[in-house]
Image: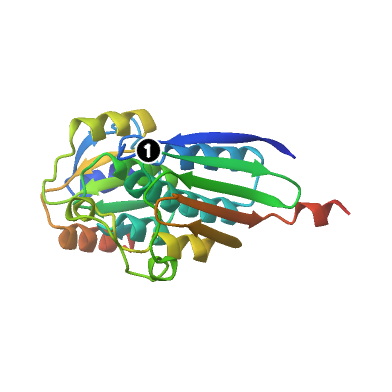
Amino acid sequence: MRLADVVQRLELKVLVGSDLLDRKVSGGYAGDLLSDVMANSAAGQLWITIQSHVNIVAVGVLRELAGIILSQDRLPDEATLVRAEQEKVPLIQSSRSTFEVSGLLFKLLNE
Amino acid sequence: MLYPRREFPIKEMDFVRAGEASLQVKKILQEIHADEDLVRRAAIACYEAEINAVVYGRDGVMSLEIDEDGIYIYVEDKGDGILDIELAMMEGFSTATPEIREMGFGAGMGLPNIMKNADEFTISSAVGEGTRLKIIFRTGWKKTEN
């Protein structure tokens, strides 16, 4: 499924990466501990988290994630937005909780 | 030496740049067409080592060397050193401050994750002497030449 379709179906707001939405989403990973995400996520997954600081971008790049969904209306700081633009990591926002976004994404990808 | 030694500085508490050294190493490994699984494991190990150096290491440096036998990553820092290495290697053990944990670091999985992903891993450290990691990935390239 394309990231653009996920954004549309889950009513997400794209903060960074509106030109990167054609990429494929192969799954998801939810977590707020960076070591855990580094060790257990996989390339092509969308990462759902409440962490909004600049280092989430490094994780996104290193793990080749499809993008990062910040749940609960978490707003990344300026440094994070800039870095995400530089490294071409889509940053997406949802007003839903991690639990809800994960559930909806899981259902969507398994349709 | 297949590839000239490269060094990447690591700056203490610089979370904007934290991960950059690891990314440089990853790009080089992809350039030389290292196995995908090796690149993945190396990225994880480098990241954990780099974050440790950023959080605890004052200033540090990550070095990369490559020969026909393998990929060698050295991370050296000028931090306070580790009091008890065995304890530090235990999953879940962390000396991170509350501020660091709030950022999602300090899960105490860094050193164990390096150990899990590297083919060989040695760590030496002493209080007041900083910390030195040697992380090795065997490529088996030499064998395939024959």
Q: In x, y percent, where is residue A75?
A: 14, 40
Which quarter of the figure is the C terminus of chain B placed in? bottom right
Q: Mark 1 lies on which chain?
A: A
Which residue appears at 59% of the width and 41% of the height?
B64
Estimate the x, y position of residue B124 in percent, counting from the top left: 51, 58
> Residue B42 in the image: x percent, y percent?
54, 52
- Judge by depth and name the residue closer to the eye, A37 or A26: A37
- Residue under the point 59% across and 38% down: B28
Along the line of sight, the residue nearer the viewer: A21 or B105: B105
Pointer 1: residues within 10 angstroms few (<14), some, or many (20+)?
Answer: few
Look at the numbered disc 1 and give the secondary structure of its residue. loop
Closer-to-camera residue (B10/B118):
B10
Which quarter of the rendering shows the N terminus of chain B?
A: top right
Residue B117 shows up from this direction: yes
Q: Which residue is drawn at 62% across and 37% down?
A: B31
Q: In which quarter of the image is residue A57?
A: top left
Q: In this view, does B104 lie to the left or right of A23?
A: left
- Left or right, residue A25 beside residue A96: right
Q: Name the residue under label 1.
A: A22
Name above or below for residue B9 compared with residue B135.
Answer: above
Picture colour scheme: rainbow
Residue A102 placement: quadrant:
bottom left
Image: A109 above or below A54: below
- In the visual, does B78 lie left or right of A21? right
The reply to whether residue B118 is in sight is no
Q: Which amino acid does label 1 sit on?
A: Asp
User: Is B37 or A90 nearer to us in this picture?
Assistant: B37
| Residue B37 pos. (x, y %) | 57, 56
